[in-house]
Amino acid sequence: MEKSLVIVESPSKAKTINKYLGKDYVVEASVGHIKNLPKSKLSVDTENSFDVVYETIEGKEDVITKLRKHAEKSKEVFIATDPDREGEAIAAHIADELKDANDKIKRVLFHEITETGIKDGMDHPRRIQTNLVMSQQARRAMDRIVGYQISPFVWKTVFYGLSAGRVQSVALRLICEREVAIRAFVPVEYWSIIGEFETPKGDRFLAKLVKESGKDPVIPDEAAAKGLMERIRSGAFTISSVQKRPVKRNAPAPFITSTLQQEAARRLRFSAKRTMSLAQKLYEGIDLGEEGLTGLITYMRTDSTRLSEEAVAQVREFIYENYGKEYVPKEPRLFKKGKASQDAHEAIRPTSSKHAPKAIKKHLDKDLFALYELIWNRFVACQMAPAQFEQVSVDVSDGSLVFRATDQIPVFRGFLIVYDDTVDEDAPSPDDTDPTSKLPEGLAEGQPTAVHELIPRQHFTKPPARFTESSLVKELESLGIGRPSTYALIVTTVIDRKYVEQKDRRLFATDLGMQVNKILVEHFPQVVNVRFTALMEEELDTIAEGKRDYLTVMKDFYGPFSTALAKASKLASSIKKSLQEKTDVVCELCGKQMIIKWGRNGRFMACTGYPDCKNTKPLAEDQEKLQHITGEKCELCGGDMVVKGGRFGTFLGCSNYPTCKNTKPISMGIKCPKCSEGNLVERRTKKGRRIFYGCSRYPTCDFASWDKPVNEPCPVCGNPYLVEKTTQAKGTHIVCPSCKSVREPQDVAIPA
């Protein structure tokens, strides 16, 4: 009997789907993309029709051959790659390779990997949608053009090997502009006054001075505060107003990609990248013992807060049974569609009310459980009754000066018993002058009060807060930059490029990042323009919706871009010279002046006599900063090992230098795959010309590799690390050394 073939992206998803489809189907995985743009060239025809040339990814030939064989003998072929534009493009590439079976190919969408979700997808097959494919192709083409044509310009002006990108450069601009604002900020002193008032019954409460002669009080310094306090002490105060009003607070909407990343960062301390990796596993399927592989959440790349009627009915029943009827609103809660929302998928939610977090906790590791519980609680809360409070505001006045105390008394907790939405470390700091004491009972208008104590407090205005990963994602979303599938990648890229550093979860622009941003803003203002980038996202949407065609959008983009590139390229040499700083330091080898230049490891001093004199050395302040104690002891003399810098980057050196000249490489944080005891470290060949990676236990362990290890697990097979491979034919790409799956690399030009 002929079977039908179902093609998905990941082997883990294939296992889950196979469980539900049964013996009449064969489920195979493409293991991600099967085609990509070649790394060795632009691969976009900018002269004519912007045709894009794809090639088969190295190592995918066997996968394609296997899929062809299955397709030939299958009754039907269902391509079930992810239900988004990137998934549609992968489906088109697979269909192109299976063209002999074209008449039996159908596209199906699984928004959740459950029996219901798979049945719904299989019941509604369709053709591959060209508009979605071309929208994704336009994104790839734009990213490739910007990355491949601006990056060489940055090499020529700063140093070889840097990169620029269509969206990453806008994110960098936001971070750099925030950095400039913080550095330029001048704090301004101001004071506030808190009064502790006492009623005739002896009850006391705190209130803040809010009005002086009908205006906001202006207290610039301590002298002004003391003068005002003398005036307060001489006044006769009474309660001039007591206002009480009911307040309701509704639960937030269910998660979309951006809000999930933001909340996971705030509450769980997960990076956007980590959040999406965990969410992918929850979506594709978790082994629940007797129940087998089960998808626990809906598709995690979405910008829609829409919920299915079935899911809402299930969760309302769950709330009624577990919390009581008073927690179930009369009508299901609906949420407004965002301005830029594509609304292609539901919100991120659990796939079944049967899978409460505690019921399946034993099947999840710590991080998976934490993220699943967060998604579960947010979804349940969004369909619960609002929290109710009584807000009380009390004014105390002498006719001219007004103090105010406020209190919020819980009446009904509502959704807050499941999900407290007040946690927000990215919100502005509350004014610490606001009184926090509870108001006593029985306060009434006309009641006299005495000033028991006055508390003056000094403050200074604060600069804008640096972005965190979550607040940057929020800002990008609000500006219409990027889409659910790209947020995590944007943040990761600017950090990986060393344009941005993360300290205490805050994003700091590095000197290198500031320099690159300055050049891009000056010479490519349109490319790094926030509004222009948002408009390009809207243009991609119009292609997907069939309102505009691919060629028109690409021409509108490339015309102004190519003009700016041609103009900037003529200035590359003069820009590079302008970045070099003169110093008073004389080269100790040839006597010529030293200048400050940019290199792969940051700024350094180089002799102006180059190439006759190749003397270089680190900047004095950088060398001083680098030398910090690691806690590791020198095995030769017992001294402290400190981080030092040299022309080849950072390394560990003994603090007793020059008496002890022991040095060693810095660990990359990845266990050796051969001995499992040592850590992988970066090493250089004897002449220092090539970098390779080996075990820290050498010569006991002789593991060595030319491929740079990447400290992140394989999303396909779970191998604890990946490697960065570079070949002449394929350029640089990320590969799993275990299952050989290839991760689609960033569109950054590769140095020739």
Image (cartoon, rainbow, N blue to C red):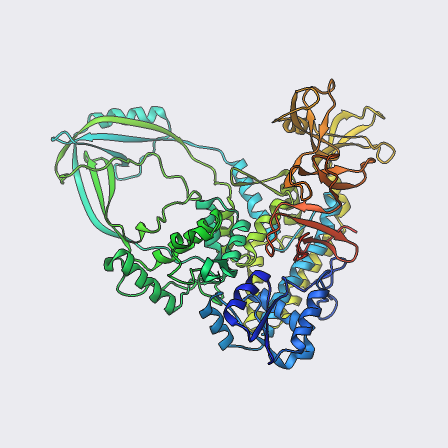
Q: Is residue 397 left or right of residue 694?
A: left
Please tell me which residue lies in front, 79 or 128: 79
Please tell me which residue lies in front, 370 or 477: 370
Task: Residue 693: give x, y in percent of width and height.
Answer: 73, 41
- Residue under the point 50% across and 60% down: 283
- Residue under the point 37% across and 27% down: 221
Q: Is residue 35 left or right of residue 171?
A: right
Please tell me which residue lies in front, 699 or 108: 699
Residue 411 visible here = yes
Task: Residue 254: give x, y in percent of width and height.
Answer: 40, 58
Query: Which residue extends farthest right?
Result: 612
Up-down relation of residue 4 to residue 227 (above or below):
below
Number of disc labels: 0
Q: Is residue 26 left or right of residue 54?
A: left
Up-down relation of residue 227 to residue 407 (above or below):
above
Task: Residue 126: give x, y in percent of width and height.
Answer: 55, 77
